[in-house]
Amino acid sequence: MKAVRIHRYGPREELVFEDAPLPVLAPDEVLIQVVGASVNPVDWMIRQGKLKEVLAHAMPLTLGWDVSGVVSAAGNLVTRYSIGDSVYSRPDIARNGTYAEYVAVRAAEVAPKPATISHIEAASLPLAGITAWQALVDVCKLKTGQRVLVHAAAGGVGSLAVQIARARGAYVIGTASAANRHFVLSLGANEFVDYRTQTLESAIQEPVDAVLDTVGGEAQEASFPLLKAGGVLVSIVSPPPQELAAKYGVRGEFLMIGPNAEVLEQLAKLADEGKVRPVIGAEFALEDIARAHALSEGRHTRGKIVLYVGPPRGRPV
């Protein structure tokens, strides 16, 4: 098969589009023929070696941990999925990833693809969608009528978080640059804050119940005074300072996610009900992966960056 692999940590030049062996299938795994994958910041952070102390990957390594595709083989312990099933997944990040024509994924990490969207759209959902869902639903316990502040609401995680929060009946305030104002409001946000020209303190008049921090730094620190007593700030960037949380009488949580098929099923339901729509900021062919990484490293993409792997253009995806 064709795959994009790295043989050592380093810059984008280390991404090699090359022949690679087909994955060896374990009894509890399915082999997915990849139609779409997507690019996430963790991909290029791993490529640069920033996580090598945490994730001891063997080389060569296939990057990418979002996938939507078709089951082409199943281990003898797999009972739920059959050849030809359309599925999607956020696989185990400790293993070889999805920048490839085929990937082996544990069946327990797989969910049926949303029926009403394409594989390319579905490939944009798993990692960002699981992150947004777990932050808002599992950590913040977001309820109808509560107020939530979503930072970088036009980004991959933020754009899904706005929609998930609205689907749960929350009042959503989203931050982004002025160019994304109408886009963020079109996702369902009730209020918009231009982070370049407005301060959070002046823009947000009423306290919020929850904050989803996808930015860190000054934005994270400035969010604490906005929370109601007993509220929660959950960050996917850096652990919130517990002294600040204690000062304001709130919780500060740091979220790291893993594979979660149950959440993927919930996301598929929302997508098929029209309550969550994938946002594709850019699409690249697999062999153009270096350009996709360059765009992602700029950190200003609207929605997600996706990779089209196959089948050939002209056939349904």
Image (spheres, rainbow, N blue to C red):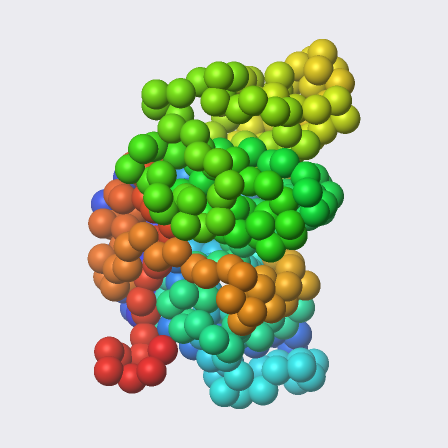
Above or below for 228 versus 281 = above
The answer to which image quadrant residue 286 occupies is bottom left
Q: Give the x, y percent position of residue 117.
A: 44, 72
Residue sitting nearer the eye, 229 or 138:
229
Q: Give the x, y percent position of residue 124.
A: 43, 59
Please report the residue visible at 41 percent of the width from the left and 65 percent of the height from the top: 121
Q: Quadrant of the C terminus?
A: bottom left
Please report the residue visible at 72 percent of the width from the left and 45 percent of the height from the top: 143
Q: Give the x, y percent position of residue 222.
A: 54, 17
The answer to which image quadrant residue 47 occupies is top left
Apparent side of residue 252 relative to residue 54 in the rendered image (left or right): right
Residue sitting nearer the eye, 126 or 48:
126
Q: Is residue 134 visible?
A: no
Q: Is residue 238 visible?
A: yes
Please report the residue visible at 63 percent of the width from the left and 36 percent of the height from the top: 147
Q: Give the x, y percent position of residue 21.
A: 39, 71
Please report the residue visible at 46 percent of the width from the left and 66 percent of the height from the top: 122
Q: Quadrant of the N terminus?
A: bottom left
